[in-house]
Amino acid sequence: MPTPSVEVAARVTNRLIIDELDYDMSHEISRFQSLARGVNSDECYIFRLEVDTHIIGEGVLFFLYGSGGTRKTYLWNTIISKF
C-alpha cells in the first residue's frame, strides 16, 4: 500500500489522519513478532500466500471465513501488523 510522502504528511491538518500517521514503529514490529509466533500451520499457509501475493503486486481479493472461534481475527491482525 502506498504511503504518503513526508511533504504531504507535513501539510496534513486532519486530526484523524495525524492520529493514523502517529504510531510507534518499534511497537508495531514487536506486535507482529508476537502475533507471528502464535500462528499455526494452516494460518501460516494463508499468511504466506497473502504476503507473497502482496510482494509480487498481484491484485487479489481474499475472503477469510469460518465459524466463530476459528481465529479469523487473529490471522487478520497478524497480516495487518506485517504491513
Image (cartoon, rainbow, N blue to C red):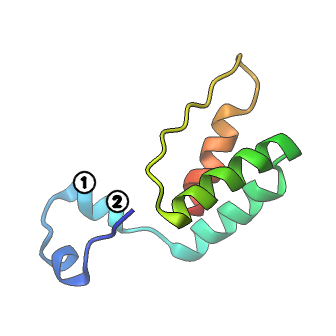
Mark 1 burial class by Cα count in 10 Å: few <14, some 14-19, many 20+ = few
Which residue is at a point 74% across and 33% down the rendered structure image?
71
The amino acid beneath tag 2 is Glu
Helix, strand or loop under label 2: helix
How many tags in the picture?
2
Q: Which mark is residue 6?
A: none
Residue 26 location in percent, x, y?
59, 76
Which residue is at a point 69% across and 21% down the rendered structure image?
66
Please tell me in which quadrant of the rendered image residue 8 appears: bottom left
Q: Is residue 9 left or right of residue 80?
A: left
Mark 2 burial class by Cα count in 10 Å: few <14, some 14-19, many 20+ = few
Q: Extreme top residue here?
A: 67
- Name above or below for residue 56 compared with residue 63: below
Q: CA distance from mark 1 to mark 2?
A: 6 Å
Q: Is residue 3 left or right of residue 28?
A: left
The amino acid beneath tag 1 is Leu
Q: Which mark is residue 16?
A: 1
Helix, strand or loop under label 1: helix
Say which of 79 and 16 sits in front. Answer: 79
Q: Which residue is mark 2?
A: 20
Which residue is at a point 37% across and 68% down the rendered structure image?
22
- Name above or below for residue 29 compared with residue 19: below
Q: Is residue 74 left or right of residue 62?
A: right
Residue 51 location in percent, x, y?
61, 58
